Image (tube, grey):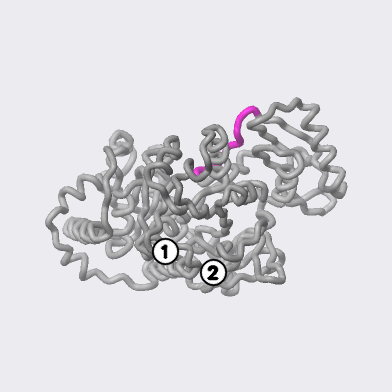
Amino acid sequence: EGNYRISYQTLRTQAYALGDLLLERSYSGRICLWGNDCYQWVLAHLTVVCGIGTAVALDKNYTVSQVAEHICRCKSSLLLYTKSFEAKVQELKSLIPETVSVECIDDLMLQSVGKNGQLYAQRQVNDDDIVAIFFTSGTTARDKGVMLSQYNLRSGACACMTLHTETYGDSLLSVLPLHHSYSCICGIYVQILFRVSVYFPENLRKLPKSFQMYKPTKVLVVPQILESLLKLLRFSKQTPKTFFGGNIKWFVTGGAPCRRELIEAYNALGIQVLEGYGITECAPVISVNWFLMPRIGSVGFPLCSVQVQIIDGEICVRGSNVFSGYLDDPDATAQAKQNGWFHTGDLGYIDADGYLYVSGRKKNLIILDNGENVSPEELEALIYEHIGASECMVYKRNRRIVAELYFAEKTLTQEEAELLVRKMNGYLPMYKHIQEVLLSTNPLPRNSNGKLLRNRK
């Protein structure tokens, strides 16, 4: 309801007051958060993490039945929600046990006014206490609850500080869902450590207006947002400086591979795109390109407190940022954490200069009848480069390699698309040839973090 500004002092005061109220009502343990990306969500998450219990971030796009399932799954006794989700919560109440309390964060803020935070100030959190649970995106399987300790959370945030991409007076436009660890940890907690101003747009449809209003110096994005902004810039006929508010220094992108051509397009506009790599289980950043020494195509150097080793072609990580385990899934935890290393499931390599490269997802590998392995991500990168598809996905179906293509800015017939693919096949060994082409009239389905939904195949 209009624009308002909150100081860090106010954030601290309100967190302590809200903490007092939650403790007086004996709320503890796993507390679910559901709602829009806003200050109230940040306040509740911060309050729970720093002295109440475990903050369980629920996807704002979940249906009420999915929310009910996750509340029961994590054995939560309290759901905190933002005011805009009032109608959904009323529908939800009939699906959850009566023992689960439901509270609106906005209402709790009003009820906590005047509390001095004495109870909350006495709370102590140990390094090994689980304080946050984020659910994985679930692109290829049922989502897992990633449990992060206080030590994991602090290590992940503090490691990002060593990049020195934040300075006093910077401002960040928050455009990614806060229920993802990338946005929550890097977009909120790292910014708190630097006292950077964080702005929340009313919605993504009004993103260009938000650039004009807030004039951010940086934005955390996924490649899909970079693609959309570039199209909007071209249609606006504004200069890049005017369109992006005049202060933008860089975009930091993660969550999915970013096309070289896209990074180069922004560099040509005088805006740096710094590609990084992370995973929820590593709280969440593993590596990122440093703004003084970026290398397009790589995901940069591992952070100072993160050890990376390539084991049988797989990127493996060790460090204080690595998660404690998966919620109620010791078998998956044991499979992921072996001999002191977390196995990311991503394939990659490190070059002679120490830059990390991600070449694909281990579980996405296409295993052919002749025993050859084909990385769909490798073929997708070639399709972007040689064919110019806006979106593409490669997978195996009926023992054939299939490419599904979507073109946003041009119309191709089936014959034209197949001809382009045949030409590209000419540069590849026979076993990597794409044997079937499908044209999609709509953008390919993605999850809320911009990753292709491969499991639908």
Q: CA distance from mark 1 to mark 2?
A: 18 Å
Q: Which residues are magenta?
A: 441-448
Q: Determine if the magenta segment contains residue 248.
A: no
Query: The N terminus is located in which quarter?
Result: top left
Query: The C terminus is located in which quarter?
Result: top right
Q: Earlier in the sequence, mark 1 or mark 2?
A: 1
Q: Is residue 24 left or right of residue 448?
A: left
Foreground residue among 314 and 4: 4
Per the picture, the main secondary structure of the magenta-coloured stretch is: loop
Foreground residue among 32 and 429: 429
Task: Identify whether 230 is placed above or below 352.
Answer: above
Residue 303: image tag: 2
Q: Is residue 21 left or right of residue 36?
A: left
Q: Which residue is mark 1?
A: 167
Q: Residue at x 34, y 46 (%)?
A: 38
Foreground residue among 243 and 377: 243
Task: Specify whether residue 166 is in view.
Answer: yes
At mark 2, the secondary structure is loop
Q: Residue at x 34, y 38 (%)?
A: 95
Q: Residue at x 41, y 38 (%)?
A: 209
The image position of residue 412, as x and y in percent, is 73, 27
